[in-house]
Image (tube, helix red, strand yellow):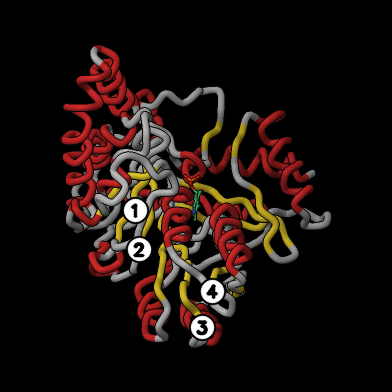
Amino acid sequence: MSLPNEAPLPPLGRAIRPAFALDPDWLTVSHGAYGATPRPVLDAQTAWRARMEAQPSVFFKRILPGALRDSAAALAAYLGADAQDLAFVENATAGCNAVLQSLAFVPGDEILVLDHGYRAVRNAAHHVASRSGAALVTVAVPWPDPDPDEIIRRVAAALTPRTRLAILDHVTSPSALVLPIAQLIAECQAAGAKVLVDGAHAPGMLPLDLPALGADWYVGNCHKWLMAPKGSGFLWAQRDRQDGLHPTVISHPYGEGFPAEFDYTGTRDSTAFLSVPAALEFCSGLGGEALMRRNAALAREGAVLLAARFGTQIGAPAEMSAAMATIRLPWRGAATREASNALRETLIETHRTDVPVHPIGDALWIRISAQAFNEIGDYEALADRCLAACA
Ligand SMILES: Cc1ncc(COP(=O)(O)O)c(C=O)c1O
């Protein structure tokens, strides 16, 4: 696929698949779920592991601290940020938990979340709220055909003087919506609420300048769209939100502040963090932001094809979408969690196809992803298999 006025991309789709360890017998249109790490990045991780295992004490005491900060500096530069404002965490869930557990809520406080928010993160908010007597306020995202202004209006209407924290997704998980995040952050902060952005999907899918977005805290994953090894996420914090911000595991550096406390939380394999620069290099070699635009265009093209084959609809307009899209399935049964799980199982067991299936409202929806190794034929094949599974 070539886009107007773009420098040519390297050969993608089938041509780039050998660079990934993906099983060729499977149809992989679910990159957003756990990512896929290319071989050169896995090789970089293996090299780091070899250094660690060659002399573990020297590695942990002398090499790791500086290497981790160098890796954080490379990632921070990519995100428009300073390295001192960024710490690695295993994943977005861990980053959100760290922020939630660092805040002291009191009875009457409110934590605002979205109904399209990631369930693990809403669970963490629920846990912290129920422990302290705070209330969880859930804002319903309009669906399908959401309108950005309506989302902003609904969030604004749910803010009260007691809203201490708003947890906003940059890209929602079940519905793949790219939310109007800058406006939402500004709206919440103007009402006196702090904002934690769950940007699990955003790095590598959307261009990012974290300080310009202005959230109080921003968490993201590197193992999804940046294609870094599994277990590499980050937590970015405004300079004046770093006091009292602790990892969920307190270890030796306690009291040394942010990001030192996050850099060492006990013995662990940090090679995923150390391989993030190799992942950044790989993404940049495939076009960087041009790859993001190509993936967004391919996801849309795939969604249009699927909606036409299904005789249904795409969940969200192109302006609110990037490298993922949600399409309503031609499913006539009840739209329950059991039905979506069963359908996903059928696709896995019978069709060697993995695609997330979610009940949203009164219908079942699939969420497709488009990464460098995908091409339009993948969505043709997906249409056949979904139609067979729904029948
Ligand atoms: C919006 C959102 N937040 C958080 C996560 C959790 O990611 P992880 O399991 O890497 O913590 C996901 C995963 O898909 C997600 O979509």
Which residue does the numbered mark 3 point to in the structure image? 162
- Marked residue nearer the N-terminal end (2 or 3): 3
Q: Within the image, what quadrant is residue 82 found in?
A: bottom left
Of residues 52 and 181, the one drawn nearer to the viewer in this rendering: 52
When the figure is inspected, residue 10 is found, relative to residue 139, above or below; the finding is above
Circle nearer the viewer, 4 or 3: 4
User: Residue 226 at what x, y percent from top left?
Assistant: 33, 43
Instruction: Measure the alpha-carbon separation of dots 2 and 4.
Output: 20 Å
Tag 4–tag 1 contact (CB < 8 Å): no
Name the residue at 35% across, 58% down: 245
User: In the drawing, what numbered circle is on residue 235?
Assistant: 1
Disc 4 CB within 8 Å of nearest ligand 1 atom: no
The three-letter amino acid code for the residue at tag 2 is Trp
Tag 1–tag 2 contact (CB < 8 Å): yes
Instruction: Measure the alpha-carbon separation of dots 2 and 3.
Output: 19 Å
Instruction: Measure the alpha-carbon separation of dots 1 and 2.
Output: 7 Å
Disc 1 CB within 8 Å of nearest ligand 1 atom: no
- Marked residue nearer the N-terminal end (4 or 1): 4
